[in-house]
Amino acid sequence: MVVSTDEQIKREVVDRLYWDSRVDASDVSVEVSQGEVNLRGNVPTYIAKRAAEIDARLISGVTGVHNRLDIEYPTTLRIPSDQEIATNIKNLLSWNASIDIKDISLAVVDGFVTLKGTVDSFWKKLRAEELVLDLQGVNGITNELAVVPSEDVLDKRIAEDIVASMKRGAAIDVDALDVTVDGGVVTLSGSVPSWMARTAAYDIAKHTVGVRNVINRLAVK
């Protein structure tokens, strides 16, 4: 097995960032130490910040990514006021078929958004956050949405559903994982061979009925 060196990883991360049209890599610096990638510098949007992290995670040999990129909107761009951002968020969430806006409240201060209220699935909590972060003028988010499932699901059934779904995916070796559920909170531990497998396991857990939260402690080895 060929083991990637830090310099090889760095070159591949930089190449991928320059390839990705969502990221202006000219203002991004990349440092790698023992497979851990540090991203620093400025990007114009949250989309670019998130894309840069995903790009780095997909490189073979990467064991972790520390995303320290700052968002610096172009000076020629008009930044919406907090009230305008709040209105845009309400409209966006109300237009989304999977989100019930009536149980959600929000506040915006200096571009930082706080979401409160309830949703009936963990993935909907994450979806609401993704939608908000893509809006112009948003500098960050505190997601305090509580997950209140529409039906009571036993922890044992949740764990069984997650494991059964993982077994259907060739990229995940369930024998190397440990899935525990307590009060609807899922903890994933153990090891996986790649970040794609780690993401796949997390996606399975977050979309399972009855899940309130997912703690992902899977190590990439």
Image: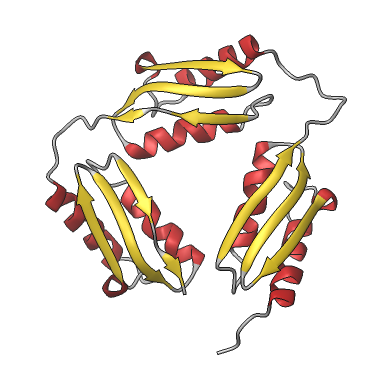
Please provide percent x and percent y for residue 216.
39, 55
Q: Is residue 216 left or right of residue 72?
A: left
In percent of the image, x 76 and y 42: which residue is there?
43
In percent of the image, x 39 and y 70: which residue is there?
191
In percent of the image, x 85 and y 52: which residue is there?
26
Closer to the camera, 169 or 50? 50
Please provide percent x and percent y for residue 114.
50, 23
Against 175, residue 36 (above or below) is above
Closer to the camera, 102 or 82? 82
**Quadrant hosting residue 83:** top right
Closer to the camera, 77 or 34? 34
Please provide percent x and percent y for residue 69.
70, 45
- Quadrant of the drawing holding the N terminus: bottom right
Against 46, residue 197 (above or below) is below
Q: How many marks?
A: 0
Against 196, residue 24 (above or below) is above
**Farthest front residue in view:** 33
Please provide percent x and percent y for residue 136.
68, 26
Q: Is residue 137 left or right of residue 123?
A: right
Q: Is residue 9 left or right of residue 200?
A: right
**Quadrant hosting residue 12:** bottom right
**Farthest top residue in view:** 83
Closer to the camera, 189 or 167? 189
Question: What colour scheme has been applied to the protein in the rendered image?
Answer: secondary structure
**Quadrant hosting residue 199:** bottom left
